[in-house]
Image (cartoon, rainbow, N blue to C red):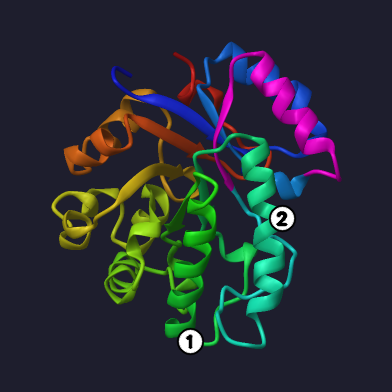
Amino acid sequence: MQGINLGLAQTGWSADDDATHLLEAKANSVAFFDAVPSKYEAGAFKAAVTAWSGVGIHVLATQGFFFNQNVAVCACRDHYKDLLRVFTSAIGDATLANARYMILGAPSSRAAACDETNFVRAVDNLGGLAAGFGISLLIENLPSPFSDLPLASLEKIGRIRRDSSAAQNFGVCLDIGNLASCLLGQESLLGNPDLEELEAISHLQVNLDFLEIKSQLQLEELLMLLPKRFLEQTLGSVSLEFSLGKIQWNLLHS
């Protein structure tokens, strides 16, 4: 697809299958990974990054860094100390991988904050910490089953950015599949007012669990439903996200 660089989110395979999937990724000209360092035992993530780099695949983003950590993205006294400890370690992984972004989104990665005010304060603080290492923190919209969480809709994400006192410290990762699950299918993306008003888009993901995409042509048609500025702002980088063992390599082949 002209002008689009396709990457792959590491949700689609386990660390034990790295070698096999690396060969597939190289054969299908995958440009980058959105890595999940929490899948690896201590020290193994560094070896994985070295192997990826050896075949010309870089890490654009890390995600899932709160997976199984039992922390809340919350600035209250009871939660913030543990959140800071885990996030500081996650910054180390992102720095090791030379990642540009850290994506905060997946509901399995975190518990909800005590309230939205404390969530916004926590994101402000974490974004400032990441920025100190040259990394941008991105908040990602969630799919429809998680409507009670702070990142459940574009409207909520817009409100978080408006309520923030340090919105310059974090951007947005727009997951098109997650968004389609909250609407009436992918056709509802066209002209969607919340989408048109969304600002600070830094990265695009496509969660294929919620879309009926079987070919690159269908994928390209989906991307053309978005405001043109989104692909311009992300330099044409789009990451495809699949469930474990469900990667459709035909969508990635150039």
Earlier residue among tags 2 and 1: 2
The foreground one among 248 and 171 is 171
Give the image location of residue 53, x and y in percent.
65, 20
**Mark 2 residue type:** Ser
Image-quadrant location for residue 5: top left
Mark yes or no: residue 220 visible: yes
Residue at 42% across / 55% down in the picture? 178
2 vs 1, front mark: 2
193 up-or-down from 94: above or below: below
Q: Separation of disc 2 and disc 1 at Cα?
A: 25 Å
Tell me the number on the disc at residue 142. none
**Whole-percent x and y of residue 157?**
34, 67
Residue 89 disc label: 2
User: Residue extending furthest right?
Assistant: 42
- Give the residue at mark 1: 115
- Tell me the residue at 43%/66% (across/down): 144
